[in-house]
Amino acid sequence: MLGAVVAALGDGAILALVATGLVLVFKGSRVLNLAQGEIGAFALLVVYVALGKQSAPGFALLAGATLLGGVLGIGTERLIMRPLVERPPIQSTIASLGLTVVLVNAAALNGTDGVLGFLPQGQNSYPLTMPPTAGRGSVVVAGATLVSGRLVALVATAAVGAALWLFFTRTRFGLAVLAATSDNTVARILGVPVRNVYRFTWGVGGALSGLAAALVASLGPFQPATMTFTLIGALAGAVIGGLDSVPGAIVGSLLVGVVQGLIKYHFPSVGGVENVAVLALVLVTLMVRPRGLLGGAGATA
């Protein structure tokens, strides 16, 4: 059972990376970015092709997907979201859903045909098995074996959480981001560069999505809609922890990962029951804490 919990924490850490990006974008622009997962997935597939597909070095895939995810996040903000900035946030959220459909279909159409051709020669359909982006090794933690992809996810989540805490509390631009996410109008009056805040949050969100996609691909077969399913778990974690709290997103996602892992461990033959358990957890949280475990007026990062 300890092994199941350790593995579940690793899976929860991947959800936490996606959820953190969701929260940053939501705090920065009040948009629930439903393309958060697919931005990273598409970035990973493009980097996979650019680096030679099956001959691509794993670490280069990880780094490249993170960087290109950030670029795609900034591009999404500039080309799609900025023209909608004065519109109700629901319109931007719907636009992000449309972007998800476009990216999934673009990846599917570029399987064997198309300009990019994501699949290796001789393979005619998804799923795709990529070179190990986080290595093939494993470590033993408290008597439980943890594969490298989940270990990297745990380390990356801890590093991202610490870096964002330092950024928000120790830098001038971090304080400006907090001001803009609290009240855009007041922030503009005080001279805070709100557009730079939007660009920053979307860029970091995209980078975290690319990192998460590379880690997901290191754990098993990968296909265009893989990160959409990951997004569902991440969204549940963000709601449980609080959509206006980065620490809440991390805590909530780890909790979702542990719940899913333990349910699968105890009921291995009952498919989908872990999703029902997570939904029940979301509903209970919303009834008891409508703004999440760590959300609310006191959420600052």
Image: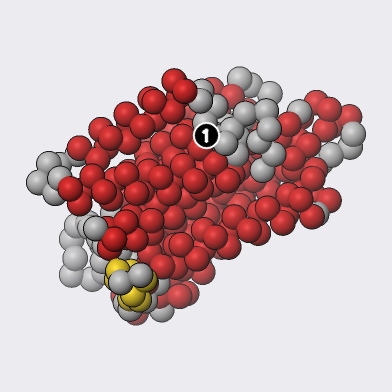
> Residue 72: x percent and y percent?
55, 51
Q: Which residue is under mark 1?
A: 293
Q: Foreground residue, 273 or 26?
A: 273
Q: Quadrant of the N terminus?
A: bottom left
Q: Foreground residue, 129 or 78?
A: 129
> Residue 266: x percent and y percent?
17, 48
Q: Name the residue: 48% across, 57% down.
A: 210
Q: Tell me if residue 292 can be seen.
A: yes
Instruction: Classify 10 Å Cα crowding around label 1: few (below 14), some (14-19), many (20 and above).
Output: many
Give, as a three-letter code, the residue at label 1: Leu
Colour pattern of the rendering: secondary structure
Q: Secondary structure at mark 1?
A: loop
The quarter of the displayed image where residue 282 is located: top left
Q: Name the residue: 30% across, 69% down.
A: 144
Q: Name the residue: 59% across, 24% down.
A: 89
Answer above or below: position of 119 versus 16.
Answer: below
> Residue 226: x percent and y percent?
31, 50
Q: Name the residue: 48% across, 27% down.
A: 94
Q: Tell me if residue 35 can be seen.
A: no
Residue ranking furthest to the right: 190
Q: Is residue 296 left or right of residue 226?
A: right
Q: Quadrant of the C terminus?
A: top right
